[in-house]
Amino acid sequence: MKKLLATTTVALGLMAGGAMAQECGDITMAEFNWASGELVANVDKFILEEGYGCNVELVIGGTSAIFASMNEKAVPDIAGEQWVNSVRVQVDAAIAEGRLHALNTGPILGLGEGWWVPEHTAAAHPELKTALDWIDHPELFPSAEDPSKGAFIGCPAGWGCQQVNQNLFTAFDMEAKGWVLIDPGSAAGLDASIAKANERGDNWIGYYWSPTSIIGKYNMQPVPYGVDYLGDDYWNSCISQPDCIDPQMTSYVKSEVFTIVTDDFLNSGGEINDFLKARVYPGPVMGSMLVYMEDEQADGEDAAIEFMIRHEDVWSTWVSEEVAAKLRDAL
């Protein structure tokens, strides 16, 4: 972790940082491009810089891109909120071969991903309890482009969950039952489709994950699948893969998020490894911060300061009293 980046800019930055920055050195850290990913990265950055004297550079990216960079180039050093499901085979191989290490296998509590419907939709149709039931009623979710078809809202292109939902759409034979799979285009497009449906009282069904501000804000209801989970081997070898032939119906895999570090960082991280292992966000706390970010249009840096001010009872359990005192002084 005491490696020095071979650039004049970083060298000058270390000199400007003084003795505190030299205590730790330079760290690269993933800032995933969604709200909780921004928050986690910026809280870590604040704690590592103000509490441990590190010099942290954030590397912005998505699930697959960040993992590939860590796996192939050992950059960044840390991925604080690596969602594992979409890259499970690769993550397992990297960990088994010692290139990467999962320091924390549960940094956020109460999380999950899958299919959801609005609260008003679920309340209006109490007889429809599982995905099997909802799929029989595409007329409840008319597509804007072809109202004779039901619209299932999947993931934007490039997201790890895109292939999963394409395979599940095929497995549940949804096209034959009158559905079309809609690409919302972006995270903003996906959020807008949920907000629009809830504000207009329209029906909506599609993919999302929790904890997120939009799930909490509209009290979206998870959809049980009504079928058994076919196991990790099948999920990893077929459902999450682009070459899955004849995918079979299965419930969604249990969501897992890891804090992953490179082998070099594990061997030199010392006390910072202990912090990363202890760093766990309670679900309600994370949910409240994501609502704050949306309501205030706050970026990850501003939200991190708000979190540190609001939730000393949480972050103070992650660090030593000496580090906690430095963080209080910095605030």
Image (spheres, helix red, strand yellow):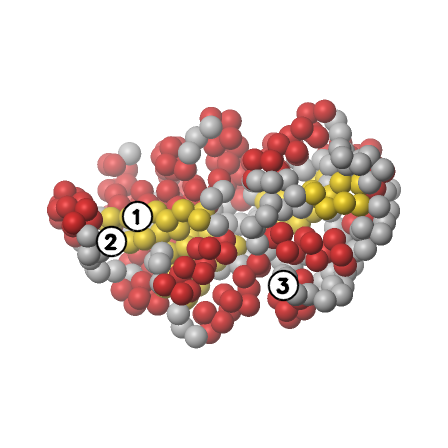
Q: Is residue 241 left or right of residue 93?
A: right
Is residue 182 visible to the viewer in this orientation of the structure? yes
Where, quadrant-wise, is the C terminus in this rendering? top left
Secondary structure under tag 1 reads: strand
Res 164 → quadrant: bottom right
Image location (x, y in percent) of residue 187: 56, 40
Secondary structure under tag 3 reads: loop
- Find the residue positioned furthest to the bottom: 97
Of residue 5 and residue 229, the one placed in the foreground of this image is 5
Mark 2 vs mark 1, CA separation in Å: 8 Å
Seen in the picture, residue 82 relative to 297 is either above or below; the reply is below
Within 10 Å of disc 3 (Cα), the crowding (few <14, some 14-19, many 20+) is some
Q: What residue would you read off at disc 1?
A: 57
Q: Is residue 253 left or right of residue 273?
A: right
Mark 2 vs mark 3, CA separation in Å: 36 Å
What's the mark number on residue 26? 2
Q: Residue sitting at 85 percent across and 37 percent down?
A: 148
Mark 3 vs mark 1, CA separation in Å: 32 Å
Q: Is residue 328 left or right of residue 120?
A: left
Circles 2 and 1: CB distance less than 8 Å?
yes
Seen in the picture, residue 165 relative to 127 is either above or below; the reply is below
What's the mark number on residue 241? 3
Is residue 231 visible to the viewer in this orientation of the structure? no
Circles 2 and 3: CB distance less than 8 Å?
no
Amino acid, disc 3: Gln
Of residue 229 and residue 63, the one placed in the foreground of this image is 63
Within 10 Å of disc 1 (Cα), the crowding (few <14, some 14-19, many 20+) is some
Q: From the image, state whether disc 2 or disc 3 is nearer to you.
A: 3
Secondary structure under tag 2 reads: strand
